[in-house]
Amino acid sequence: GDSVTQMEGPVTLSEEAFLTINCTYTATGYPSLFWYVQYPGEGLQLLLKATKADDKGSNKGFEATYRKETTSFHLEKGSVQVSDSAVYFCARFYNNNNDMRFGAGTRLTVKP
Amino acid sequence: DAGVIQSPRHEVTEMGQEVTLRCKPISGHNSLFWYRQTMMRGLELLIYFNNNVPIDDSGMPEDRFSAKMPNASFSTLKIQPSEPRDSAVYFCASSLGEVQYFGPGTRLTVL
């Protein structure tokens, strides 16, 4: 069946380091793709999204490009901050049946 | 605007007791989702509703769990009887379209 696979965490980086969190998906159609972020003690919130192939989602310095040929949606940020410490979830969504599936989440810790 | 509201925020109960978690979705949203999050299993979708109708409850662990949505502005998740392995953070989310908006969660501890 469909699934979303994220790189396993935890990921620990120093401030201003480059971040990549890998995400791949399997799908029978053409889902929308998302990255959600969960800060400590809070619910998930949308970080960015892309709805079709080659779209790039971006927000708060984070970017991810919908790659249909590699079925990937990797999250990147050029220079992380301590405040980016959180758990990041990749997700895919089918609009026709309101079906959202999340990956396992990747915990990021950024040290000063 | 108020976001998704969940109550209680924390619940501590003893094994065998009934637990009811409550959710008020964002006004105007037509879909509602219940999730459970644990360290071991991550984020699990339990059930979701479209227009107050349960669509997929395949994630509900067992018959001890039940969910209702009597109207567009209220949903409950009930566990009866509760067990220690039900300890988790339970999230409610709502949507109108593809973006889901999560509540702050209810942290449940079953002793």
Image (tube, coloured by chain):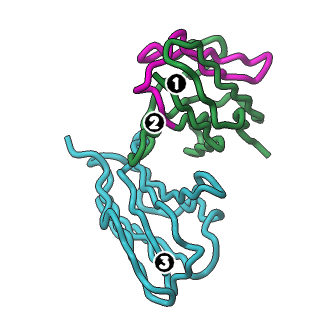
Chain colours: A green, B cyan
**Element on which disc 2 rests:** loop
- Mark 2 and mark 1: span between their CA atoms? 9 Å
The quarter of the picture where the N terminus of chain B appears is: top left
Q: Amino acid at mark 1?
A: Lys
Mark 3 and mark 2 lie on one chain; the one further toward the N terminus is 2
Res. A55 image quadrant: top right
Chain of the residue under the numbered disc 3 shown in the image: B
Per the image, the residue denoted by label 2 is: B99
Q: Residues within 10 Å of mark 2 (few under 14, many from 20)?
A: some
Say whether marks 3 and 1 touch (CB < 8 Å).
no
| Residue ID at (50%, 86%) | B15
Q: Residues within 10 Å of mark 1 (few under 14, many from 20)?
A: many
Residue extending farthest to the left is B1
Q: Is residue B60 depicted above or below A86 in this figure?
A: below
Residue range highlighted in magenta: A58-86
Out of B25 and B109, give the one closest to the viewer: B109
Out of B83 and A49, give the one closest to the viewer: B83
Say whether marks 2 and 1 touch (CB < 8 Å).
yes
**Element on which disc 3 rests:** strand
Residue B110 is tagged as: 3
Q: Amino acid at mark 2?
A: Val
Say whether marks 3 and 2 touch (CB < 8 Å).
no
Q: Return the x and y of residue B12 as percentages of the image width and height.
A: 39, 76
Per the image, the residue denoted by label 1 is: A49
Q: Return the x and y of residue A106 as percentages of the image width and height.
A: 61, 37
Res. A92 image quadrant: top right
The nearer-to-camera label among 3 and 2 is 3
